[in-house]
Amino acid sequence: MTELSRLPGPVMDLWEWQYQGACREVDDTLFFHPEGERGAARRRRAEAAKAICNGCPVMMECREQSLAVREPYGVWGGLSEDERSAALAGTARTALRKVG
C-alpha cells in the first residue's frame, strides 16, 4: 500500500492565494516593461504597478514566491526586478557572513 504521507499535497492549496491578487483585474502590461522602455517612463509604470501591489491582500505571498523562484521580470509583490535582485544579493551576503 502507498504511504500517503510521502505524496505531495494538493497543488491548489499552494497557489490559491493568487485568486485574491489585486492585479487580477489589471492589464498585465502594467507589471512588465515593454522592449526598450527606459528612464522616467519605466519608473512611472513600475510605480503605478507598485501602487496596486501596496493595496493587495496577498502582496507578501507574491513577494515571497517571486524571490523563491528568482522571478527575473516585472513587478511582483511590490518589488521591481532591481529591488528583487538587491534583496537576493543581500540575502546571499547575509548567508555568507553566517557561514564565514
Image (cartoon, rainbow, N blue to C red):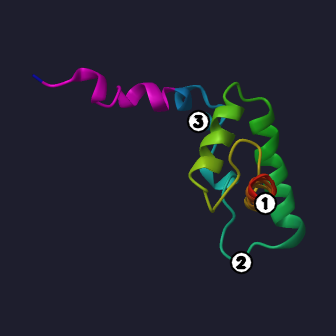
Q: Which residues are magenta?
A: 2-16
Q: Identify the mark at residue 5; answer none if there is no mark.
A: none
In this image, 94 relative to 30: left or right?
A: right
Q: Nearer the viewer, mark 1 or mark 2?
A: 1
Instruction: Let me know if residue 47 is in the magenta part.
Output: no
Q: Which residue is mark 2?
A: 36
In this image, 18 relative to 99: left or right?
A: left
SS at mark 1 in the image: loop
| Mark pair 1, 3: CA separation | 43 Å
Instruction: Let me know if residue 4 is in the magenta part.
Output: yes
Question: Residue 80, image x and y in percent?
Answer: 76, 55
* Nearer the observer, 67 or 97: 97
Q: Say which amino acid is labelled 2.
A: Gly
Q: Residues within 10 Å of mark 2 (few under 14, many from 20)?
A: few
Q: Which residue is mark 1?
A: 100
Q: Which residue is mark 3?
A: 24
Q: Say which amino acid is labelled 3.
A: Arg
Q: Say which amino acid is labelled 1.
A: Gly
Question: Residue 64, image x and y in percent?
Answer: 65, 40
